[in-house]
Image (tube, rainbow, N blue to C red):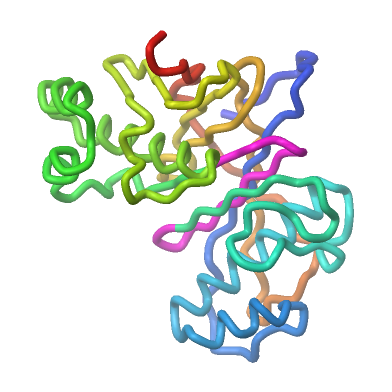
Amino acid sequence: MAGSSNGYSPDPRPAIWLCHQTDGIEAPPPAWLTGYERDTVGKFSGPREREYLTSRWLIRQAIGKSASLPAHQCCPVDGRPTVSGRPDGWQLSLSHSHGLSACATRASSAIGLDLEPCQRHPQWQKVARRWFTPVEQEWLFREDDPNAFLKVWTLKEAWLKATGRGIAGNLQTLEVRKNFEIYGDQPDEDWQASCCYIEGYLVTLVFRGSRPQWPDITLLEPPPGDFSLVDAVSMEASWEPLFQRTIRPTGC
């Protein structure tokens, strides 16, 4: 399903760009890396190195296609890639897991993205007991559905990225109740969440907007073996929408 709407929206539509990690022989780090990125990738080897290079290649593709610029003219800020460095004005969120990388983009508005393989939920009850609220534990344990747990987990991860916080001490700042009614600790009433299945992964996006929206979703071909910044071609991809929700302020 190509889940998009042709109706007018006053909010800029968020976008998610994905690509599978490239395979191949080891290659020298590409020349387009910033000094910070070159220092960072030098700490990795093997699959971790290729994962890092794939994600940095994808970020440039995502910014470029969002801003209608060639990828080689684009880059994120150094450090955690939450905003674009060139051109400025784009909010970013990166997630990668088990060979798939994703980058969400939105113009001048907070955004958070998380993805997990659909079957990744070992010992989920232990995680829920340790980190989830009593309300979440009660309905999750009653339903005994690991896929429901995974949806809650990705919602929390995407929320923390969108609000600029780490996991430690913050997982309970978002509470997901039965039927995926969502409450967060931010006072504003313009936080939205969208959740869908893409390419065998659960993908969740949290962003600020006046109403829920399905993001534009594009699967790009994997990067070349040498990670050159060619214009990436879009590939066919199917996705299944699951739910959209407004995140209500706690206490409503």
Residue 213 shows up from this direction: yes
The residue at the point 54 percent across, 60 percent down is 20
Farthest residue toward the top?
Answer: 252
Closer to us: 2 or 156: 156
Whether residue 174 sits left or right of residue 108 in the image: it is left
Residue 233 shows up from this direction: no
Q: Give the range drawn in magenta.
A: 97-112
Total marks in image: 0
Q: Is residue 109 magenta?
A: yes
Whether residue 230 sits left or right of residue 147 in the image: it is right
Closer to us: 81 or 26: 81
The residue at the point 65 percent across, 59 percent down is 221
Q: Does the magenta stretch include residue 98?
A: yes
Closer to us: 163 or 63: 163
Quarter-of-image position of residue 190 = top right
Q: Is the magenta stretch mostly helix, strand or loop?
A: strand
Quarter-of-image position of residue 27 = bottom right
Quadrant for the C terminus in the image: top left
The residue at the point 51 percent across, 27 percent down is 194
The residue at the point 27 percent across, 16 percent down is 178
- Residue 155 drawn at (x, y percent): 41, 34
- Residue 61 drawn at (x, y percent): 74, 58
- Residue 185 drawn at (x, y percent): 43, 26
Quarter-of-image position of residue 225 = bottom right
Quadrant for the N terminus in the image: top right
